[in-house]
Image: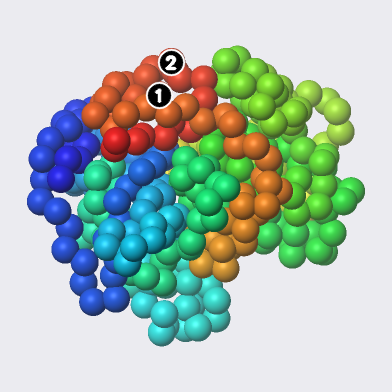
Amino acid sequence: MKALVYTGDKTMEFRTVDDPRPAAGEALIRVRASGICGSDMHAWAGHDERRPAPLVLGHEAAGEIVGFGGAVRRVTVNPLVTCGKCEACVAGRDNLCASRQIISMPPREGAFAELLAMPEGNLVNVPDHVSLESAALCEPLACGWHAVRLAKATLGGDLAEVRCLVLGGGAIGLGAALAFRAQGSSRVTIVEPNSSRRNRIIETEDIKCLAAANDDGAPDLVIDAVGIAATRASASKLVQPGGLIMHIGLGAAEGGLDVRRMTLQEITFIGTYTYTMADFQATADAIFTGKLGKLSWIEKRPLKKGAQAFDDISTGQCAAPKIILQPV
């Protein structure tokens, strides 16, 4: 099969690799759409020791199961493979499974390829009226869905009057804003400094999107979808006393938090990692029923030109919050 292979710092090659061999209980999927994630960008730039070259990256995928009788079974893929038996899994917090694996990280190759092997339990059927490009957004959107669900529980279960500020208008930040709206409130603003991306969000999703935070009232909830020192500093400064910071972004590990202010003003900080299978299913259902909007903010490119897509994202030449690569 053909695949886009990460071969070294800022280097990708479109080449022939061995087909995956499904293990017992796994299905073989012909990938039709796979999104470029921030974690793929980190690996491509040489900043993720967990993803050594050579490696097929990509974990936001949708496609068709190969050899499924006479009918075509269309699926979206939860890339987190968990044991199903540990304390976290049994408690419904399978995203915290100690033995979890994710495609695009050894020992599992990723989805920037024509074929992918995945356990049957990680697949969600996609109805015919939903494009596989939209279905591939289930993974990044589930990150925001999970974060908003945790925030909702922390804030008392009702988001109607909660003011939310999202830092970052990429797919994770935009997904969090869409999930916040779908789960109970329209009082959400995104801060996105890239003017092209900001305009794309405003045009496609009718969400308030600013170049910088203004003085229009301190938010009850700040969702940091970037995760660098500067955005953590902004979150610490902007959130109201007694408010909540949800930290999704994994841009940099250190710096930014004003722990003194958080302590003196009883600000809650919650790190949020991916999603559970229940979150993934709920996100899929929200996509299928249109609760997360039209999802028309993607840009589609052929997989064989994926290397250029990475370059364009790195240099800020892409207005779309998400590039979807298509093997065919």
Image point 79% across, 59% down: which residue? 155
**Colouring used for the render:** rainbow
Residue 224: percent from left, percent from top: 60, 41
Q: Nearer the viewer, residue 105 or 271?
A: 105
Q: What residue would you read off at disc 2?
A: 317
Residue 142 appears at what percent x and percent y? Answer: 56, 53
Q: Is residue 166 visible?
A: yes
Residue type at tag 1: Ile
Residue type at mark 2?
Gln
Helix, strand, or loop for circle 1? helix
Provide the residue designation for mark 1: 313
Q: Above or below — where is 238 with respect to 121?
A: above
Q: Quadrant of the C terminus?
A: top left
Residue 273 visible within the image: no
Gap between marks 2 and 1 measured at Cα: 6 Å
Pointers 2 and 1 in contact (CB under 8 A)?
yes
Q: Report the front residue among 46 and 70.
A: 70
In percent of the image, x 51 and y 56: which residue is there? 126
Q: Residues within 10 Å of mark 1 (few under 14, many from 20)?
A: some
Can you say which quadrant of the picture contains the N terminus?
top left
Front-lying residue, 138 or 197 = 138
- Disc 2 packing (10 Å; few <14; some 14–19; many ≥20): some
Residue under the image location 29 percent in, 37 percent down: 327
Q: In the visual, does 69 lie left or right of 145?
A: left
